Amino acid sequence: MRWQQLLLLLLVCGATATLFAVLTAQDPADHLVFATWGTPTEIESFQRLIDHYNTSRRPRHTVVLSHIDQVSYTERLLVRAAARSMPDVIHLDRKDVPLFVHRRLLEDLTSVIEADSAFSLEEFLPALLPGCTVEGRFYGVPHNFSTFVLYYNRDHFDAEGLADPDSTWTWDTFLEAARRLTRRTPRGEILRYGCMVYTIPFIMIQQFGGRILNERMDSCIIASPEAAAALRFALDLAEKHGVTWSVLSQNLNWDDMFAGGRCSMIANGRWAAAWYQRSMPQGALEVAPLPRGILRRGALVNHLITVASQSTKKQQAWAFTRFLTSETAQRMINDDGANIPALRSVVLSDAFLHHASTPALDNAVFLTELPHSAVWPVVQGPYLTGHTLLSEIELAMRHITLGQASPEQALATMEVNVNRAIAHQRYRPEPASFVGSLPFYFSCGLLVLAMQVLYRRKRRRHHGQ
């Protein structure tokens, strides 16, 4: 009976392992998976691209869309990487590239690009190309981008006798305009706020001469007088000057506030233009460069198409990447109006500069801001995710607003917390093979013990008979 039980146990284990392998294995004839995030409009745009590709190119592997929520996009991809289930082609933000390269999750495309005589990086805006590289190697191809601009309500400016903002504006100029644009009731209740710029605290820190990470991006150095001054200015807009709402006001949607005429100036990207245009009176919407601090520094969102190193369909993944960055696909992206295409032939044409969705808008401002712009919110390096930096800066701003810490104290605490996160990720040991590890031997011991218990119980039952 002992060997019969052992054989039965081995058969059960083998069947379970086989079933698990079948359920989790990727079929070689399966789809090519493309992962992205975005609003419903952006997802519809990508789905149209995929449908066009599948229909017109008839690829060997049909492309399917994997939509991941933007808030948890990076973290979800890292979880899928740990489970060896990465998508084949990944729409990735420039800020995340060093982290993914450090973890060896992206395919080095340098040799692929060099070998493809029909593909040329010179067709893209030059300012976007450095964002595709790590240590001189290409890990992605530019797809779309946006700089941050200052959207403003021209009707409000005209009513207050204010000149249109331009590249000479400083934050002091901005504050003075925001004061004049803010409207109150006789009781002091706010009817209209002058501005909202909480979207760009990291850029403001850099404008004031501060830094978030060091040159090697392996240490946070945000605790500086320059960074504290930038944060104090941003928070004083609400707490001291009353020209914007507090960071604690969770129930206010800034896009709705601006589009509805209850805010006169807002820092945002191209994706907001069509929504503002539809919601505001004709001729009211316009854009200008962001105000400057000690330095003129804008904000750049740079999105790439990358290929997962785990993909078993790299040739097909490159073919789809080529399509997404082709003139056909880039014109489709431009037509949707939410993003700015990366291809020079499209972005420098009237199709973008005089876009049908925003015909009266000075779309050239998005391009003139490009040479002065840094990655938004900041390049995080190989050891951080955006969630860490954004959550820490939001926590610092809350502590300052609630009077729990000065800007200097809050940033010093943030620096310690971020460096702790960097140290944890930097020295995180590589996962060891299960076979031969302590859990493996422990599992084997439990198996032997269980067999012994079964054997002894069976033997006692036999002698009892």
Image (spheres, rainbow, N blue to C red):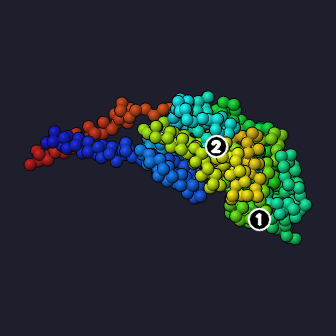
Circle 2: element type: loop
What residue appears at the point 71 percent right and 50 percent down from the top-left corner? 350
Please name the residue shown 66% across and 43% down the image.
345
Residue assigned mark 1: 282
From the top left corner, tell me how far across and down residue 76 is, in percent: 52, 47
User: Residue at coordinates 19% horizontally, 44% vertically from top-left?
Assistant: 8
User: Hey, which quadrant is residue 10 in on the image?
Assistant: top left
Quarter of the rendering occupied by the N terminus: top left
Describe the element under mark 1 as helix, strand or loop.
loop
Tell me which amino acid carries mark 2: Leu
Examine the rendered structure and indicate whether residue 455 appears above or below residue 252.
Answer: above
Q: CA distance from mark 1 to mark 2?
A: 30 Å
Answer with left or right where residue 172 lies relative to residue 215: right
Q: Earlier in the sequence, mark 1 or mark 2?
A: 1
Question: Which residue carries the number 2 mark?
Answer: 343
Count all numbered tags in the image, as a single digit: 2
Amino acid bearing label 1: Gln
**Residue 25 visible, this angle:** yes
